Image (cartoon, rainbow, N blue to C red):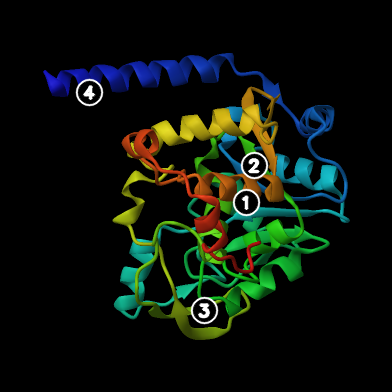
Amino acid sequence: MPDTYKRLSKGRRWAKTLRWKLSARAIDEETLIEEILASGVLEPGDIVMVHSALSSLGKVVGGPETVCKALQKVLKETGTLLMPSYHQPQPILKMIKEHVLVDLQTAPSTVGKLTETFRNLPGVRRSSHPFSSVCAWGRCATEMTSGHIYTSLICGPGSPLFELLKRSGKYLGLGVDIRIIGLYHVLEDNWDGFPIKVHYPEPFMVRYVDANGLSLERELIVLDPDVARTRIDQHEGTWIRRWLTDHMRSRGILCEFKIGQASCWVVNARSFYDELKSLALEGITIYTTKEQFESRQPLTSVSIRNHGTSTGG
């Protein structure tokens, strides 16, 4: 019976996807630009990190390159466009332990066709991290990617997402939910008062080749997968993902709109980060379970004063 149920569920999902593809309207570069500008969420000169599910937009004429070009034309050369070029850390760490070098000159992004297309465009820079690199194009691309090599933390000082916060950039989601916002890790990596220990106690020594062809050996601090079990991007974190979406929407921090057929959103990095920090002081983080939420003890004013801060503000 369970196997039959799984097959039926898979069949229904496949049929739903097929119906959606057949009914999806075609969208070209000009239409994408018009709809982005009409939403009012981006303008020339903005610094924006983009996560996407390309298929959610509809039938994009020209595919992922069309989306990249549309975003570049909206931001213009005075703006800066960033996209993740991540890999799953565990396979990469396994490769490193087996003395297999990761080469960021050729290693593809594993987080969607759009990000891999973007990585290969002229003028795009890739930051130096073996499994959490970020690619950037535009006025601040070099400044926002060059410092990643100097921090052992994924989102430590000098990392692209730290720079996004520092510059009050924007985070844009195209057809994805807020589980993917890397600012969660900026808070963990840069605020001494974060209430949960999320990293392995000991750093890893890693060797890899960066996007400039340099062979590097350095220490990295990585997240503990056991702690991540209830995190917002895991199945057990579904409830906190929904709660946080509603919360950020109610605070006016999460702005929602549509492009093509995709449900989209944008947040200001500084506003989102500051609200995450305020919630953490109340005992609410992206790791909080529903049971912990209902029984939490918010910090007192005395404990808040003694909780400590660091470069993340």
Instruction: Give the Cα separation between the discs numbered 2 and 3.
Output: 27 Å
Q: Which mark is residue 209?
A: 3
* For discs 2 and 3, the disc positioned in front in the rendered view: 3
Mark 1 touches mark 3? (CB < 8 Å)? no
The kind of residue on which mark 4 rests is Lys
Q: Secondary structure at mark 2?
A: helix
Q: Residues within 10 Å of mark 4 (few under 14, many from 20)?
A: few
Kindly identify the residue that appears in the image at 48 percent across and 49 percent down.
Answer: 299
Classify mark 1: helix, strand or loop: helix
Counting residues from the start of the chain, the first of labels 4 and 3 encountered is 4
**Quarter holding the N terminus?**
top left
Q: For the residues marked 4 and 3, what is the alpha-carbon distance in whole angstroms?
A: 43 Å
The residue singled out by tag 2 in the image is 64
Q: Is residue 106 visible?
A: yes
Q: Kindly indicate the quadrant of the structure image that contains residue 66.
A: top right
- Amino acid marked by disc 3: Val
Q: Nearer the viewer, residue 25 or 217?
A: 217
In the image, farthest residue toward the front: 302
**2 or 4: tag closer to the N-terminus:** 4
Q: Which residue is mark 1?
A: 117
Q: CA distance from mark 2 to mark 1?
A: 6 Å
At 41% from the left and 67% from the top, the residue drawn is: 222
- Marks 1 and 3 sit apart, C-alpha to C-alpha, by 21 Å
Vertical relation: 144 (above or below) 112: below
- As measured in the structure, the alpha-carbon distance from the residue carrying label 2 to the one carrying label 4 is 32 Å
Earlier-in-chain disc, 1 versus 3? 1
Out of 107 and 179, give the one closest to the viewer: 179
Q: Which residue is mark 4?
A: 6
Q: Nearer the viewer, residue 110 or 172?
A: 172
Work out whether 174 lies above or below 305: above
Query: Residue 96: which numbered mark, if any?
Result: none
Q: Secondary structure at mark 4?
A: helix
